[in-house]
Amino acid sequence: MKRLHVHVSVEDLSRSIGFYSALFASEPSVVKSDYAKWMLDDPRVNFAISTRGRAAGLDHLGIQVETGEELQEVYARLRKAGGNVVEQGQTTCCYAKSEKSWIDDPAGIAWETFHTTGESTDYGDGTGENQARVAHEKQETQSACCAPQAAPAASKACC
């Protein structure tokens, strides 16, 4: 059975753990100095937060599988979806050992597909994730040269 994965970058881990614990009515299953994860069954999601140096907000989405066979099925879907698939293979990331691949969706959101095979005492170096993001940044730089500049957002006063 597959599980949706959502990873959000946060500025204040402790405050965010409090918020999401209340929202999910559950404490995280993993807490580190820079990372927390909830493995929820309702909704079925692997929800993670971290302070890994990126801007606060959505970091990436993913599909977590429970078997190697499911992983091969999802890999086939990635190839069918098109785009540049970054096959990371066996890696350590988010305090876990996994096999994974990455792809950017048409809006530029990074998606990972992975099968977790064990735990790790360190976060990992993010090698595959970084390659996927660098590939997207290069595409964005090449295609954005002639794009119109967005107008500044109007101030939104409340009440």
Image (cartoon, rainbow, N blue to C red):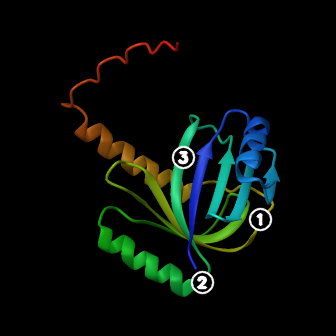
Look at the picture and state if 112 lies above or below 78: above
Q: Residue furthest front?
A: 159
State the image coordinates of residue 4 (x, y, percent, origin top left). Answer: 55, 64
Tell me the amino acid under the disc marked 2. Answer: Thr
Secondary element under disc 3, as helix, strand or loop, is strand
Q: Residue furthest bottom?
A: 69
Q: Mark 1 and mark 3: span between their CA atoms?
A: 21 Å
Left or right: residue 26 compared with residue 67 = right
Q: Residue furthest left?
A: 146
Look at the picture and state if 74 lies above or below 26: below
Identify the residue at horizontal 52%, vertical 14% (top origin): 158
Q: Earlier in the sequence, mark 3 or mark 2?
A: 3
Tell me the amino acid under the disc marked 1. Answer: Ser
Tags 2 and 1 in contact by the CB under 8 Å rule?
Answer: no
Q: Considering depth in this image, is 102 or 23 the residue closer to the camera?
A: 23
State the image coordinates of residue 86 (x, y, percent, origin top left). Answer: 43, 64
Q: Label 3: which residue?
A: 59
Placement of the N terminus among the 4 image quadrants: bottom right
Q: Mark 3 and mark 2: span between their CA atoms?
A: 25 Å
Tell me the amino acid under the disc marked 3. Answer: Asp
Left or right: residue 23 compared with residue 79 = right
Secondary element under disc 2, as helix, strand or loop, is loop
Q: How many marks?
A: 3
Q: Quadrant of residue 12?
A: top right
Identify the residue at horizontal 38%, vertical 70% (top origin): 78
Q: Label 2: which residue?
A: 67
In the rendering, which numbered label is found on residue 120? Answer: 1
Q: Quadrant of residue 47?
A: bottom right
Q: Earlier in the sequence, mark 2 or mark 1?
A: 2
